[in-house]
Image: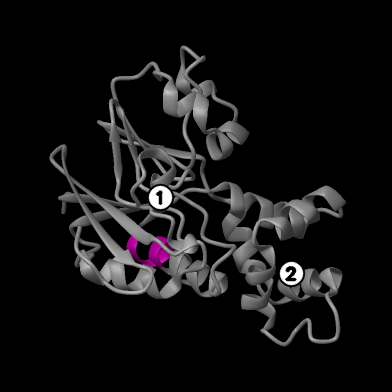
Amino acid sequence: MKNNRILAISDIHGCYDQFIRILDKVNFNSTQDKLILLGDYVDRGRQSKQVLDKVIDLVNTYDAIALIGNHDKMFLDWLLTNDGMNEFNFFRNGGLQTVESYCGLDFFDSGIDTLKAKRFILNNFKYHVEFLKTLSYYHETDNHIFVHAGLNPEYENWKLTPYEEMIWIRDEFHNGKVQTDKTIVFGHTPCVSLHGSANVWFSEGKIGIDGGAAYGYQLNCLEVTNNEVKQYCIKTKEESNV
């Protein structure tokens, strides 16, 4: 059956309860909907492991599309290298909460041992690591481009945007004009930083959907049906319609 709706969600950041609630709120139906997740499944929130388990199930069972975000990449870089800067970046950006979701809240009671934590995750959750390694940086449809952070307007062919910029870029993308007729749906930068509200940000050729869930705002879902859009949200503390 042809998908009737595209549902896009970004920057879940370990907020598992909100993730489950928003899927329920939009009545996600895998036979009629295409779910596209724009990355940043981990860090800051308390249930990164649970979020990734759910994302893996949605991809494997319901043919959802999952992209990689900068936090997912930092998690991978920490796990797969012995680079001190990778470790610093991961833990500076909410990695401790991610590790605790895998290892338990009491794992570091006797002191923070990052090597022990890394070994535990690699030994017990290799399937999470392998899953993250397979994720794409963008997804393209007839009318939209989905990407975690954005695209570099300097490139005549947007696909030449370096992968690192696709998960990190901000102002150059927000303020520039990407050379494409398609609408770019992205996360990464909380909407409150774009227009002073956690609600979805609409601009010419761009739609920002990061509701800042991990910062106490909300988790957004963008519904696209025949090029018409609708937004839903789950507040961090209480459910609310937008």
Task: Give how far across and how far down residue 48 sits, in percent.
Answer: 55, 69
Amino acid type, label 1: Asp
Q: Residue at x 66, y 56 (%)?
A: 93
Front-most of residues 201 and 30:
201
Q: Is residue 60 left or right of residue 104?
A: left
Q: Does the magenta portion include 230?
A: no
Q: Residue at x 64, y 50 (%)?
A: 73
Task: Give how far across and how far down residue 59 sits, in percent.
Answer: 41, 60
From the image, state whether disc 2 or disc 1 is nearer to you.
1
Q: Answer above or below: position of 58 versus 89.
A: below
Residue under pointer 2: 122
Estimate the spatial distance between the alpha carbons at disc 2 and disc 1, rounded to whole Å.
29 Å
Of the 4 image quadrants, the one containing the C terminus is bottom left
Range shown magenta: 58-63
Amino acid type, label 2: Leu
Q: Is residue 3 visible?
A: no
Residue under pointer 1: 210
Task: Give how far across and how far down residue 12 sits, in percent.
Answer: 45, 61
> Which secondary structure is most common in the magenta stretch?
helix
